[in-house]
Image: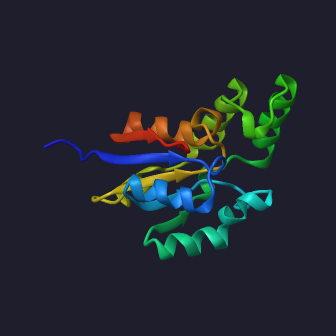
Amino acid sequence: MGDPVFRMVTIGVYGFDGESFLRRLRYADVRLLLDVRQRRGVRGPEYAWANSLRLQAALAQAQIVYEHHRELAPTTELRQLQYAEDGRQGVGKRSRRELAAEYARRYTTEVLDRADLAPIVSALPSVGTAALLCVERDSAACHRSLIAQRLTERHHVTIEHVRPL
């Protein structure tokens, strides 16, 4: 028998409110949420629900396990690199559609290549789904897509990118 195949979704904060976010997690049968944000706060009152302590409380009530994986978060320097490219292209962080090529390259070599994903994979639920969380609405505009790609290529994880309905 081959390696087990795990299911995972990626999800962002933007475009959801707290209730629709939890509903989307329940629909995807998420049992474990892996927060890969560096800073676990989101600006704006409409996203107060996604700030770490509030999010953790809501997840606990929904019986979803929460883990923060800061080792997978981009550094401040890398985030600034992406923001500079966003500015050059005239797009806001909340409307970005893709990552800058240099950001993706450097995130991969400076963060992802140094991270040991095996413990994360071994902790994935055998029943239900795990979710990678960051803020961007579109996974292609977020480092979580790079993590997902690595998990697919090296760890037999099937990925679905979830967006607000």
* Residue 106 screen position, x and y as percent: 68, 33
Task: Reply above or below: 66 against 151.
Answer: below
* Along the viewing direction, whichever of 63 and 122 lies nearer the viewer: 63
**Splitting the image into 4 quarters, where does residue 160 fall?**
top left
Q: In percent of the image, x 51 and y 51: which residue is there?
A: 132
**Viewed as shown, does residue 66 lie left or right of 97?**
left
Count numbered badges in the picture: 0
Q: Indicate whether 135 appears above or below 141.
A: below
The residue under the point 60% across, 62% down is 18
Q: Residue at x 60, y 53 (%)?
A: 36
Q: Residue at x 78, y 61 (%)?
A: 45
Q: Nearer the viewer, residue 145 or 136?
A: 136
- Quarter of the view holding residue 88: top right
Residue 39, quarter of the rendered image: bottom right
Task: Give percent across and percent down for residue 134.
Answer: 62, 50
| Of 45 and 109, the residue lying toward us | 45
Image-based side of 106 in relation to 80, left or right: left
- Say left or right for 150 vs 42: left
Q: Is residue 117 found left or right of 126 in the rendered image?
A: right
Q: What is the quadrant of the N terminus in the image?
A: top left
Q: Position of residue 55 (x, y in %)?
A: 61, 68
Its colouring scheme is rainbow
> Is the residue 68 above or below the residue 148 in the image?
below
